[in-house]
Image (tube, rainbow, N blue to C red):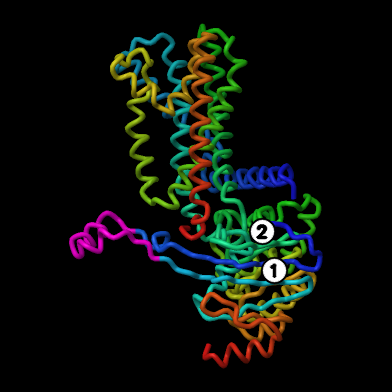
Amino acid sequence: MNSISVSDTVLKIEKLNIVFNSYVYRRETIRDRFVRAVGSPLSSLRSNKNQLHVLKDFNLEVKKGERLGILGHNGSGKTTLCRCIAGMLIPSTGRISVNGTRRSIFNTTIGIIPELTGRENAYLLSVLMFPELENDERNDLLEEALEFSELGDFLDTPYMHYSKGMQARLCLSVISSNECDLLILDEVFDGADMFFQEKIAKRVLNLIKNSGAVVFVSHNLEQIRTACNQVMVIDGGNAWFKGDVEEGIKLYTSRGH
Amino acid sequence: MDNNFKYKLLIRQIYELAKANMRSRYRKTIAGFLWVVLNPIIMYSVQSFVFRKFLKLEVPNYSLFLLCGLLPWIFIVMTADMVTPILDFSGELLKSFKMSPAVLVYAQVLDNFINFIFAFFLILIPTWIFSDQTFSGVIFLPVALALLVAGVSSACWLLSVMQVFFKDIRFIVSFLTSILFFLTPVFYPVEFVPEKYRIFVDFNPIYAMIEPFRYCIYNYNLELLCKSLLRSFVVCCMIFTLAVGFWKRKKNEFYLSL
């Protein structure tokens, strides 16, 4: 991952290709191999070199102030793209350049050490997500986030006893407490209850507005309408539309998604 | 972000997570932090008693001799056992947001190392004081400890990354350490091993990390101590190179395999 000098561009992706080898996600035990060798001796001699081409010659530029919503059916490569931008996956070929700090969130019910209390887990989550913060800054941020979560006395009970909704409340409150240059959010509103979803949506929207640029993945079109000012539709490993939100949503729905 | 600042942040994360690990481990137990020393003390006492009284090993000052080998051994085996599956079992967490997987590994190593240091000195100091051994080797103890923690950290990083790709690793580690306990001169002196079987000792990486403790505490000999420290250093470098090499080769597939 490289830094880019054009100050207005926060994210630039050039000719990105992501290819997964089938053996990575299809492991065989000795028993499987034996059964395959007995069942089909010839095919077992051939090496298993199937490849899955998830993103093909993918190009993208996101400028400061852009809030890009990504639409696409399951398995179209949205999460893979986000993980690449986050620096978790390394492109097979191509280049991803990010100007500034980036933060990515793919799950909102994370417990770092479930045996510890919600408050302790919130602290750990902030240390792992925002390690650059000084202690005073972190304490202020946590105090505000924990108050926002409205978990009250539950904050001092073990995280492992929390319901999914309570876990989402705590994580979303901490995650949404600090802005950055590039924010990557992959279906972050799932899990929280109806009342809290409205409350957190406002907070996340505020975070989105204060962050430099945002890449936002959601299947909820209303959320895309509220949060984004650009839409990209991905299909078959390519971006076949990038532009106006309403136009993008219309194209996405008209393709039978 | 420059590299120094990145490492500083990484160390901060490791320290905070190790602290939290320690807090969570003994929460709700009656003995609490006492378990840190109880486990090695019990192991050490029972083995010391059995080998001295039942097997009647002819080793002068056997308690101190056993202490130098057994406690580092417990640290190495316990840490490898705990850390090997750590990345594999933390897949959900690692895929939730971008964080260095090394934080999880090194935080657990640090947690175990702090426990080991407590237990080591709590048992070592009284045993050493009541023995007639010289204290000259004490100045080399920090070097032996540094090499031990460096070797264990590298080995744990290698094993935990391997476990993500090969799910059999933790079973192999557990099986190998059980065998190695008898093949490593922990409860008997290296001199007891016949010349033709010395290969098990010469190519035993765990013994390479344990040996300097013997020469620092039990059997101080500057020349042999320097040789053993050098051997330990070479083993550390080899494990580190293997760990870095394996990570570089496999890092592209790491998140896919979680």
Bounds of the magenta segment? A28-50
Disc with the residue nearer the chain's start (2 vs 1): 2
- In what quadrant of the picture does the N terminus of chain A appear? bottom right
Mark 2 residue type:
Ala
Chain under numbered label 1: A
Q: Which residue is mark 2?
A: A122
- Residue plotted at (57% across, 70% down): A57
Q: How many marks?
A: 2
Q: Secondary structure at mark 1?
A: helix
Contact between labelled residues 1 and 2, with CB atoms less than 8 Å apart: yes
Q: Which residue is mark 1?
A: A149
Mark 1 residue type:
Ser
Q: Residues within 10 Å of mark 1 (few under 14, many from 20)?
A: many
Secondary structure mostly taken by the magenta-highlighted segment of the chain:
helix
Please tell me whether residue B94 belongs to the stretch shown in magenta.
no
Q: Report x, y in % for residue B33.
A: 56, 38
